[in-house]
Image (spheres, rainbow, N blue to C red):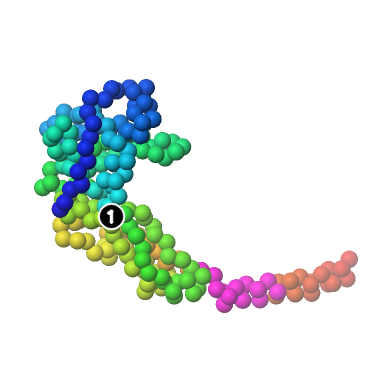
Amino acid sequence: MSQTTLVLQTGRLTGSPAARRLRAGDVIPAVLYGQGMKPVTVAVVRRDLRQALSGPAGFNTVLSLEVDGKKYPAVIKEVQRHPVKRSVSHVDFLQIDMRELLTVSVPLHLEGEAKAVLAQGGLVDPAVDTIEVECTPDNMPNQFVVDVTDMQPGDVIRLSSLPMPSGVTALGDPDLVIVTAIHGTTEADAVPEAVEGAAAEAADGEATPGADAGE
């Protein structure tokens, strides 16, 4: 598996004022840590980070971080965002062992058009956005794609039905519903309701004269 190289800056000052100055210059404060190493305070150019994560794996991209001439295989463990702008304000990089298992959340995407569901006014709804799996960095999937073309109203797709690539294990309840085909309301469904409403109005009309006569 090829790794995307990302050069990190070292020697940055810590503290909120220093972090604000970095962000003003489009540089993001960050930290690199991992088993057997002392955490390293670093920074990354926002443009370089965006480019490194622009591939299909997105935030699950396996990175080769270059720090003072030394390279570390790593992934993004956590990002913090500005509460309003939603721009990345801090990054945690985790050094990894390419042979060890990782737990990652992989995006779930739907493809195709469930015509039978749409014809009845229904819709296909993804119950989850990501699938949590365990795998080595070499086997990490970029995404899971589910074809919903043949789904019928009321159908569900469960986690156990999602094919896993070799070396990848899905975590969680196998019966977890990940996609649902929701029923809609058709004209045929609406007719009985209309008939019932008309019958109720007629019954009310017949009962009213009798009530007046008895007074």
Q: Secondary structure at mark 1?
A: loop
Residue lying at 25% horizontally and 41% vertically, measured from the top left: 76
For residue 156, say whether it is visible.
yes
Of 11 and 178, the residue lying toward us:
11
Query: How far across and how far down the image is residue 211, in percent?
Result: 83, 68
Q: Residues within 10 Å of mark 1 (few under 14, many from 20)?
A: few
Q: Quadrant of residue 94?
A: top left
Residue lying at 82% horizontally and 70% vertically, measured from the top left: 208
Q: Give the left or right position of residue 134, taking residue 24 as reference.
A: left
Query: How far across and how far down the image is residue 83, in percent?
Result: 43, 36
Query: How far across and how far down the image is residue 166, in percent?
Result: 16, 60
Residue lying at 65% horizontally and 73% vertically, measured from the top left: 194
Of 136 and 82, the residue lying toward us:
82
Determine which residue is flagged by label 1.
56
Q: Amino acid at mark 1?
A: Pro
Q: Which residues are magenta?
A: 184-198
